[in-house]
Amino acid sequence: QGLMHGIILESPALDSGWYWQDKQQAFHFYAQLGEALGCAQDNGSGEQVACLRSLPGHAFLDFFSAQLEVVEKRLKQKSGVDGSSMWGILRSLFGVLTRKFKPGGLEEHDNNILANPLWPLLCFGLIVDGTESGLPATPRSIYEGHMSSMVPIYLNHESDEGSLFAVLVAALFPWEQRTSVTHAAVDAILTWAFGGNQTFTQELLQKFYPGRWTRQPLFRLVDAITDAVFKC
């Protein structure tokens, strides 16, 4: 009490699953990562934690670097980006914007993990553990439940907050053969990003982000991410 008289929040994500995860999700996610690092999952015995602690520090850095290298390699392959000339870049971008969406699947040595859509670029999430000593709830719930200091709060969002994130999500979307930003691709990306709930996503798209020739597909993705992750 009395430590602050006002708060300014710039571009906050107050309860988005892209940034905040509950304890069960966190344990599941990091257990999968531990297994990918060579430490088998356990039933709570602590064996996986002991295994991870025995690894040299560079093992974690090497793992993350390898993830980024795979992402970079696949982005080049899937997008067909040719950076050798301006004409090559323009031709590649035209292909991404007009190429027909073709669903794809996991490749050899891939693992299906539960993570935010920007993994590994956004490689962690804050854990809502429900405790007094940790984080009892998401910031939105804390504020609306009057669990925070009751001081004036100024909250600011950009009109197209999701622009950069939309480009990254479109580029990182794993379930397609070649990178595409058509209406069909955006429908598939949003269904995946919202947890695979097709009924919910279809209703959402029809009501708020319908695909039509007067609205570019990428802008639909920008609007959806701006609303879902930041504003709502």
Image (spheres, rainbow, N blue to C red):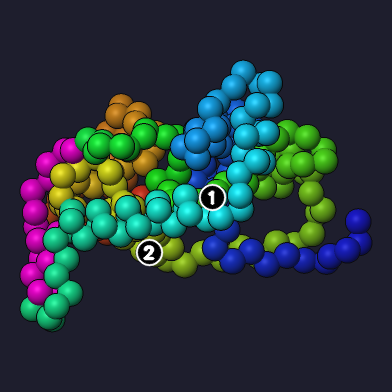
Left or right: where 229 falls relative to 75: right
96 in the magenta segment? yes
Badge 2, how many Cα within 10 Å: few under 14, some, many 20+? few
Furthest-right residue in this view: 2
Which residue appears at 42% of the width and 34% of the height? Answer: 113
Instruction: Identify the secondary structure beneath mark 1.
Output: helix
- Residue 185 x, y percent position in the rendering: 19, 46
Magenta stretch, residue numbers: 88-104
- Residue 12 x, y percent position in the rendering: 57, 58
Which residue appears at 38% of the width and 38% of the height? Answer: 194
- Residue 168 x, y percent position in the rendering: 34, 58
Amino acid type shown at disc 2: Leu
The tag on residue 59 is 1
The picture quadrant where one finds residue 81 is: bottom left
- Rounded to the nearest whole Å, what is the CA distance between mark 1 and mark 2? 30 Å
- Residue 134 x, y percent position in the rendering: 77, 41
